[in-house]
Amino acid sequence: MNENETNRVPREFWAELYHQTGLVGGLYDTKPTKSYEIIKVHEVFDEPVDPYTELKKAHKKGKVIQCANKGIDNWDDCVKPLWIDTLQYRIKPEPKYRSWTAEEVPVGAIIKHKNDTVHRYLILDVDKEGVTVTFRNSLKQFETIHIIFNFLGSWHDYSLDHGKTWLPCGVLEE
């Protein structure tokens, strides 16, 4: 490339500059050394940049969007986000669970793998490392196994009402 040639900076750079500063400029590579120089501040997009594009995509996919007044960390769920500049938006954070301790395990509860609609395990006992459960195997015989606490957390749900409602195994962290 000779010194008279210029390369346009990618659109993503301008979008980030606009979101951070509200300014849009003409930034070009004017030298082979990759030093940049502002030529002229002007609108470089054919269409306006939507700062909520990624959030709108997440909302269409079923993610819960939360909003709050700018500068205030008091978030509320938005059923129909307005996408206005006086509010800040985010995807609602997923709840985080930690594994049960031995004292927290609901002995007598039914557990299941999160996406399994067939197999169920009954918690019989608990010790310092995990839980002992019983279940019916493929031969329709009862088996008893031991599951360590760390394995229970993100992979299983439990029920205290014979499977009417299911909750994640573990304790919700605030």
Image (cartoon, rainbow, N blue to C red):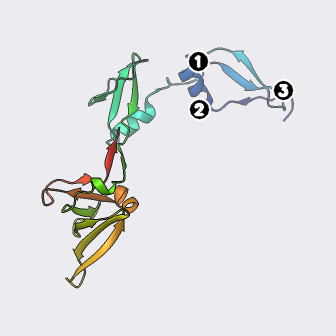
Q: Please name the residue shown 40% across and 19% down the image.
A: 72
The residue lying at 35 percent from left, 64 percent from top is: 130
Task: Write down the quadrant of residue 157 in the picture.
Answer: bottom left
- Label total for image: 3
Secondary element under disc 1, as helix, strand or loop, is: loop
Query: On the image, numbered disc 1 is attached to which residue?
Result: 43
**Amino acid at pointer 3:** Asn
Q: In the drawing, does residue 164 fall left or right of residue 174?
A: left
Considering depth in this image, is 42 or 87 the residue closer to the camera?
Answer: 87
- Residue type beneath disc 1: Glu
- Split into 4 quadrants, where in the image is the N terminus? top right
- Residue visible at 54% across and 24% down? 46
Indicate left or right for 111 with 12 as reference: left
Q: Which residue is mark 3?
A: 4
Number of the front mark, 2 or 3? 2
Q: Position of residue 147 (x, y in %)?
A: 34, 68
Per the image, label 3 sits on a secondary structure element best described as loop
Percent position of residue 45, x then y: 56, 24
Marked residue nearer the N-terminal end (3 or 1): 3
How far is disc 3 from disc 1 in space, using C-alphas?
23 Å
Q: Residue furthest bottom?
A: 139
**Residue at image mark 2:** 12
Quarter of the rendering containing residue 38: top right
Q: Are marks 2 and 3 in contact (CB under 8 Å)?
A: no
Q: Does 120 appear above or below 5?
A: below
Q: Label 2 vs label 3: CA separation?
A: 24 Å
Q: Secondary structure at mark 2?
A: helix
